[in-house]
Image (tube, coloured by chain):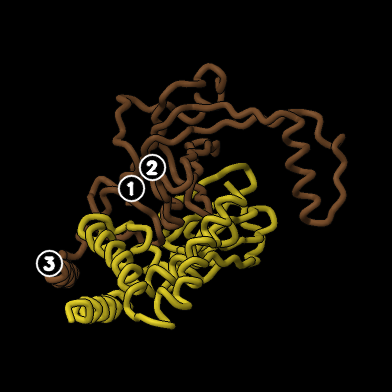
């Protein structure tokens, strides 16, 4: 009787914590995949490059360059890395002008919707109170794992086929630790 | 015993649910494109890493004119952010008044500079560092790259070690 009550509570905890953690798990899952491939891409920012021709631009001011490009004339700053190159920085874009030829390379950066926000939470850039939420989420995941093991009894429970799945889940990280560490 | 376990489980569940529901939301504003300033939103600019402590700044021109003599020194430089690491935000290129620039490099993830920092004024502090990569290492790296790209590589094409200079980052303030 008491054993059944215990199992009932295990199921209640697993069910309700599962509901509570569904959204958070998706956040961490999306960001997890994104940052897993950080060698291959910037998971936060999308960078696009365009080439424009504005004709010879020697002697032009940054405002005039932007005007020729059809951009608003306001800019953050400029930089001259050498005599033939002018860099104009605006909000969201960098224009690199080859002054003699007038070829302009534009580089724009914008945040990746959804992935940026999930990374922001996953990597705890928010800090402060989010740290506690993230800790609670981690504890909840541990509880979900433990209660998940004991939810069902019998053939489909831990003593049945469950032990093979649970064993595989433990063996996988151990195998890769043995392989790579 | 089992009653105690059940009671404990009930308490845990209630505590977790309550904690999730009542924890405050963060007050720290996000950097617009993934950077991690430690004081975002303050008028003085976004701070990264340790607080700046040097009382005077070294001109980038002076630093590059006499690179060797500054090696190992903790320096503060001032300039414009003219480049940002597009992959991880792990370095910024700081441009001086006369078109020269230096790289301010931090360990991956220690500070993450946003792409939006480009064009902003920056004050940065770090240890001036000389990096020497021996010929053998360069050849091995290039051979590996060539093999990955399916290209041929002639080891004799590299005959001198690579020498690089950078400010190993301790902290920075980028004006917003």
Q: Is residue A21 left or right of residue A160?
A: left
Q: Which residue is mark 1?
A: B175
Residue that mark 3 sits on: B4
Q: Quadrant of residue A81?
A: top right
Which residue is at 56% across, 19% downward?
B68
Give the numbered dot on residue B122: 2
Q: Is residue A93 left or right of residue A101?
A: left
How far from the left and from the top, in percent, is residue B173? 33, 42
Q: Which chain's residue wears label 3?
A: B
**Marks 3/1: CA–CA distance:** 57 Å
Q: Residues within 10 Å of mark 2 (few under 14, many from 20)?
A: many
Instruction: Kindly identify which chain the residue marked by label 1 belongs to.
Output: B
In which quarter of the view is residue A6 placed? bottom left
In front of the other: label 3 or label 1?
3
Seen at 61% across and 67% down, the residue is A50
- Seen from the viewer's position, the closer of residues A76 and A125 is A125
How far apart are the alpha carbons under marks 1 and 2? Answer: 6 Å
Pick whichever of labels 2 and 3 is earlier in the sequence.
Answer: 3
Badge 1, how many Cα within 10 Å: few under 14, some, many 20+? some
Name the spot of residue A54 as percent of width and height, x first: 63, 65
Say which label, 3 or 1, has the lower sequence index.
3
- Above or below, A137 relative to A22: above
User: Helix, strand, or loop for circle 1?
Assistant: loop
């Amino acid at each position: 009787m008491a054993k059944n009550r215990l199992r009932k509570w295990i199921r209640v905890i697993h069910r309700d914590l599962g509901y509570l953690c569904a959204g958070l798990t998706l956040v961490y899952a999306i960001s997890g995949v994104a940052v897993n491939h950080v060698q291959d891409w910037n998971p936060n920012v999308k960078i696009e490059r365009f080439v424009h021709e504005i004709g010879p631009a020697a002697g032009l001011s940054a405002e005039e360059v932007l005007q020729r490009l059809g951009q608003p004339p306001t800019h953050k700053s400029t930089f001259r890395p050498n005599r033939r190159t002018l860099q104009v920085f605006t909000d969201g874009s960098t224009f690199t002008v080859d002054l003699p030829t007038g070829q302009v390379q534009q580089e724009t950066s914008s945040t990746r919707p959804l992935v940026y926000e999930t990374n922001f939470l996953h990597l705890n850039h928010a800090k402060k109170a989010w740290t506690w939420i993230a800790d609670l989420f981690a504890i909840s995941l541990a509880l979900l794992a433990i209660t998940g093991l004991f939810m069902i009894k019998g053939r489909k429970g831990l003593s049945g086929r469950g032990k093979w799945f649970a064993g595989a889940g433990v063996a996988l990280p151990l195998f890769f630790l043995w392989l790579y560490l | 015993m089992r009653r105690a376990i059940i009671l404990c489980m009930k308490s845990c569940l209630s505590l977790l649910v309550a904690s999730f529901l009542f924890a405050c939301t963060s007050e720290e504003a996000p950097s617009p494109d993934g950077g991690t300033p430690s004081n975002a939103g303050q008028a003085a600019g976004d701070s990264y890493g340790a607080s700046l402590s040097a009382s005077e700044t070294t001109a980038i021109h002076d630093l590059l004119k006499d690179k060797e003599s500054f090696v190992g020194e903790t320096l503060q430089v001032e300039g414009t952010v003219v480049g940002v690491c597009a992959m991880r935000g792990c370095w910024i290129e700081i441009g001086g008044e006369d078109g020269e620039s230096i790289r301010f490099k931090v360990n991956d993830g220690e500070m993450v500079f946003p792409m939006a920092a480009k064009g902003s004024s920056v004050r940065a502090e770090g240890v001036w560092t000389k990096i020497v990569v021996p010929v053998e290492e360069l050849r091995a790296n290039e051979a590996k790259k060539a093999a990955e790209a399916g290209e041929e590589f002639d080891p004799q094409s590299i005959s001198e070690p690579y020498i690089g200079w950078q400010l190993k980052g301790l902290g920075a303030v980028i004006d917003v």
